[in-house]
Amino acid sequence: QERRMMSASATSIQKMVRGRIAYFDFVITMVSIITCQSAARRWRSKRRLNVLRTQQRECAAVKIQAIYRGFSRMKCFVITLCKVITVQTAFRGWISRRELSYLKEEKRRIENEASIKLQKMFRGLSCSMK
């Protein structure tokens, strides 16, 4: 009977020790799982953050490129506009000088005709007075 009691006590102690060992294994396993999950989530978050940063940089680069292209096109437009204005100014000046030359020539012709008429009238009067 004493042996049975000792055997039952030993079995009970073994059962409790095995239960404690299983519980500690369970806790250690849970802590390991939580640690692994945390590491995986951290890795995934870092990867997402890198993707977002890359996208943000690409968007910024695209905006910078668009602004630079716009500036470059505007600069080319202004340069072209200045060249067009210069050509127009030169052409209008040439036309004005040509027109002025025609007007001066017309004035000389009219003055010449007027002087010829005056000379004719004067000669006619001087001849009729003699």
Image (cartoon, rainbow, N blue to C red):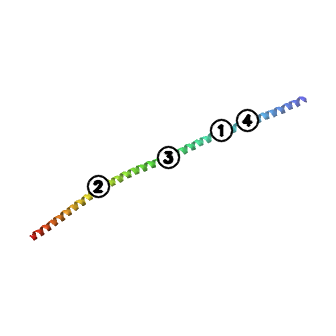
Closer to viewer: mark 4 or mark 3: 3
* Mark 1 vs mark 2, CA separation in Å: 81 Å
Q: Amino acid under label 2?
A: Trp
Q: Quadrant of residue 55?
A: top right
For the residue pair 37 and 109, the one nearer the viewer reads as 109
Q: Are marks 4 and 3 in contact (CB under 8 Å)?
A: no
Sequence-wise, the earlier of marks 4 and 2 is 4
* Mark 3 vs mark 2, CA separation in Å: 45 Å
User: Which residue in the structure is indicated by mark 2?
Assistant: 94
Sequence-wise, the earlier of marks 4 and 1 is 4
Which quadrant holds the N terminus? top right
Residue in view at x 48 percent, y 48 percent: 67
On the image, the x and y values in percent for residue 99 come to 27, 59
Which label was assigned to residue 28?
4
Closer to viewer: mark 3 or mark 2: 2
Sequence-wise, the earlier of marks 1 and 3 is 1
For the residue pair 114 and 106, the one nearer the viewer reads as 114
Q: Amino acid under label 1?
A: Ala
* Mark 4 vs mark 3, CA separation in Å: 53 Å
Residue in view at x 40 percent, y 51 percent: 78
Residue in view at x 15 percent, y 65 percent: 119
Q: Is residue 105 left or right of residue 19?
A: left
Is the residue marked by circle 2 packed among few (<14), some (14-19), or many (20+) residues within 10 Å?
A: few
Sequence-wise, the earlier of marks 1 and 2 is 1
Is the residue marked by circle 3 packed among few (<14), some (14-19), or many (20+) residues within 10 Å?
A: few
* Mark 1 vs mark 3, CA separation in Å: 37 Å
For the residue pair 108 and 78, the one nearer the viewer reads as 108
Mark 2 residue element: helix
Is the residue marked by circle 1 packed among few (<14), some (14-19), or many (20+) residues within 10 Å?
A: few
Q: Residue furthest left?
A: 130
User: Which residue in the structure is indicated by mark 3?
Assistant: 64
Closer to viewer: mark 4 or mark 2: 2
